[in-house]
Image (cartoon, coloured by chain):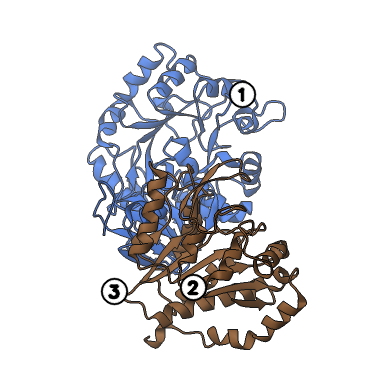
Amino acid sequence: MRGGQGTTRAPVLQFTNCRILRGGALLREDLWVREGRILDPEKLFFDERRVADEQRDCGGCILAPGFIDVQINGGFGVDFSKTTENVGSGVALVAQRILSHGVTSFCPTLVTSPPEIYHKVLPQIPVKSGGPHGAGVLGVHLEGPFISQEKRGAHPEAHLRSFEARAFHDVLATYGPLDNVRIVTLAPELGRSHEVIQALTAQGICVSLGHSVADLQAAEEAVQSGATFITHLFNAMLPFHHRDPGIVGLLTSDRLPPGRCIFYGMIADGIHTNPAALRIAYRAHPQGLVLVTDAVPALGLGNGRHTLGQQDVEVDGLTAYVAGTKTLCGSIAPMDVCVRHFLQATGCSVEAALEAASLHPAQLLGLEKSKGSLDFGADAGEAPRRRDPAKGWVRAQVSGSSWFLAP
Amino acid sequence: MRLVILDNYDLASEWAAKYICNRIIQFKPGQDRYFTLGLPTGSTPLGCYKKLIEYHKSGDLSFKYVKTFNMDEYVGLPRNHPESYHSYMWNNFFKHIDIDPNNAHILDGNAADLQAECDAFEKKIKEAGGIDLFVGGMGPDGHIAFNEPGASLVSRTRLKTLIYSKVPTMALTVGVGTVMDAREVMILITGAHKAFALYKAIEEGVNHMWTVSAFQQHPRTIFVCDEDATLELRVKTVKYFKGLMHVHNKLVDPLHSMKEGN
């Protein structure tokens, strides 16, 4: 006998014999899913008087929320900033391939580009739900062009811009409509940045500080204006100094608005950040750490030489060099490798490592009710299992945000 | 009565679970023949529930044809509150076994008409054919369910005001009379803090100040205790019933299993 009002006939799936990441701990609990959402089985039992239609034994696995990558420039030969034709299929390819890294949602990232590129490309990358076809697109991350000339890194100098003249109007003129934009990285020392940060924040866009020579005070003011993220901490900013900690000092600043948590991206591939620096940041402010790949198009291409646009790249394991040199040209560590490396380097708990790649980015983007966790009501999905013995993880292609991991 | 005395809490819990297991299996429950079980909450029965879950997980015991009726529930506490008895039963028992949710009955402390809810509960028990085995616990003041000292020994399911509890202040509870109607009653009593109440309940007279004493007048009651709970009894009483353990143990040994194709 089925009771209750408006009970759906959709099948209820129960994952048994597993540990689930919930509330910051790994609990020995079953995970219940219906129609792409995590279900409260107690409510199901007492209110609807139903049991599961199908049970799946997870063999002692950990079930974790899908990873969220908020900084990824491309992969598998695709460069989000260079493709102007067929951007959609490039994004779709990356979205499909990163599923096997555990990423179920991401922000395709565009580096400093001329306005024509933004106007052409942005409309072709709409926000899209994930599924077995690929990770969901949460919105685009625009890294530049409003950044510091001195700290531009690999960004092309010719296309750097300022918004001193007309503040937010300059921003709109450069990017075009902001509908598909989720994060903007800018340098707060640029004139009128406060107006811009406030305007972007008012539109629901996350403002991140990066590629900047700002001192701590400028950074704090930017946070007070609405900035909530730091782009790849330590890289492309002033180094920590004990009398002026710069942007890095935000991790322990006492001048942030009450209740505000500052999040910061870290590339934990073992190459771009020294493990000791990673540990310093983690110990100073563990709740704000967000793992990002900042992956470049060489991600996933395998060892050997590849031609990417104008560049020849040599891939050797987790390192990508400009061909024929020892110059690093971007990160290529997949997210699950970053999570494992982060776990090893910091000695943190498995729960903390998983949260750094799921819960924290979800909190950064204000999505924690539906993504980044296995709480009741969060997004979940069907999970056909696929074993990947080479990497020692049992993987599942999942739509939405749920995922299997077995270290 | 049978007074079954085991050395410690774990052994007492196991004995009780084995007894329940055997009773269910020997009853041969089926499609048209459900075994009805009354169930308690609190810390005492936790060990017993754990063992029952073990027997279920090993495939020896199924609750598919078992109907359960819990003794009580707080009034006004949200059903999913961690202190509610619904939460207790879900987390400690129901979620680990194969009982049909339609057969797991717990009083609804948030019903619009509380007395009607109590009356409906009595009716459900009747419609289920009465309770085959009512398992209960006993408080340090000798109460069963929320039938505190002074509660009528012929009471039925009703609303009770709680004095030892600040919040919540009221609960719905089966009455002493409700439990007395069961064909068999098993009371679990463990711990030295229960010893005095056990003495009052079985060595003194039937008295509404120690409501568990009502079961002296029930034809089939088993008290399952650990050594500590017997500390206030006469040596004579304890020796007598310990001397009967070889008889008591025939009820749990052999331990039956549904795997035998019962």
Asked if one can make out residue A298 in the rendered structure from this viewpoint, the answer is no
Residue A241 image-quadrant placement: top right
Tell me which chain the residue with mark 2 is part of: B
Q: Which residue is mark 1?
A: A215
Reply above or below: B54 against A108.
below
Q: Residue B73: x, y in percent? A: 49, 51
Residue neighbourhood size for the residue with mark 2, other residues' Cα within 10 Å, grouped as few (<14), some (14–19), many (≥20): some
Q: What SS does tag 2 mark?
A: loop
**In this picture, residue A71 sits left or right of residue A385:** right
Among the 4 quarters of the image, the one containing residue A294:
top left
Residue that carries the numbered disc 3 in the rendered image = B32
Residue topped by disc 2: B184
Residue under the image location 40 percent in, 80 percent down: B27
Relative to A273, residue A227 above or below:
above
**Chain A representation colour:** blue
**Foreground of the two, B197 or A271:** B197
Q: Amino acid at mark 3?
A: Asp
A28 with respect to A184 (left or right): right
Task: Spot the brown chain and give its letter.
Answer: B
Q: Residues within 10 Å of mark 3 (few under 14, many from 20)?
A: few
